[in-house]
Amino acid sequence: MANSDTSVLFVCLGNICRSPTAEAVFREKIKNSHFSVDIDSAGTMGHHAGVTPDERAKAVGEMRGYNFKGIKSRRVVFEDFERFEYILAMDKENLRHLLEMCPAEHQHKVSLFMHFADSDVEEVPDPYYGGKRGFEYVLDLIELACEGLLVKLAPRFEVR
Ligand code: 4NP
């Protein structure tokens, strides 16, 4: 985060559907701001390491103008807890895994991503075994939470 204003890691299970989508959406939103943010995504499971995002997530995201170029799945590593200021889990299961892995001094960085959304929905559900509509719903939630995250971060940069 040395040259960035802040840093955000989005985390789901496989890092091929939800968290790469959140990475692509937040990159786009940050592009239109004057902030510099270190943005990445990762999964709590390593099965898809090195793989590009799920074609269904990509198709739905690209339809709304998001760019998935360069994103490849990776597992959460211990150094992530040092590197990132915000570590945002897509659901409670991944939140629990992150908190189990995370050293005590960094636990405050870990939270549910939907906590930032103006919504009663608490989790971004796993769309992997569902259809296209599930991916569209996931994208709706991710857009909402990314907007909320940006609103939350904005005052910090305005007082620099
Ligand atoms: P993600 O979705 O956690 O949003 O990337 C999943 C991707 C793969 C699997 C489950 C969820 N899987 O079981 O392989």
Image (cartoon, rainbow, N blue to C red):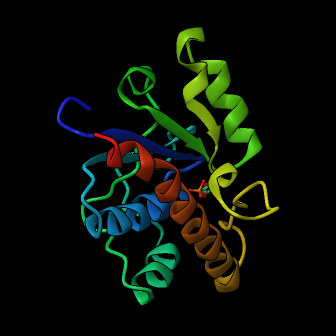
Q: At 57% across and 39% down in the image, what residue appears?
A: 45
On screen, residue 34 above or below 56? above
Looking at the rendering, in which quadrant would you find the C terminus?
Answer: top left
Residue at the farthest bottom position? 63
Residue 45 or 38: which is nearer the viewer?
38
Residue at the left extreme of this rendering: 3
Where is residue 47 shown, x and y percent of the image? 51, 44
* In this picture, residue 102 sits left or right of residue 153: right
Image: 134 above or below 121: below
Residue 153: % across, % down: 45, 48
* Residue at figure coordinates x 34%, y 46% from the top left: 157
Residue 52 vs 84, above or below: the answer is below
Residue 129 makes an appearance in the image: yes
- Please name whichever residue, 10 or 109, is drawn nearer the observer in this view of the structure: 109
Q: Is residue 99 above or below residue 93?
A: above
Question: Which sits in the foreground, 66 or 71?
Answer: 66
Q: Quadrant of the N terminus?
A: top left
- Where is residue 84, by image quadrant? top left
Q: Number of numbered discs present?
A: 0
Q: For the point 43% across and 48% down, which residue is it?
A: 155
* Residue 25 location (% of width, % of height): 43, 67
* Residue lying furthest right: 120
- Residue 76, given in percent of the width and then of the height, sits at 47, 33
Q: Residue furthest top?
A: 104
If the picture is divided into quarters, which one holds ligand 1?
A: bottom right
Q: In percent of the image, x 39 and y 20: which residue is there?
A: 82
Residue 17 seen in this snapshot: no
| Left or right of 25, for residue 92 | right
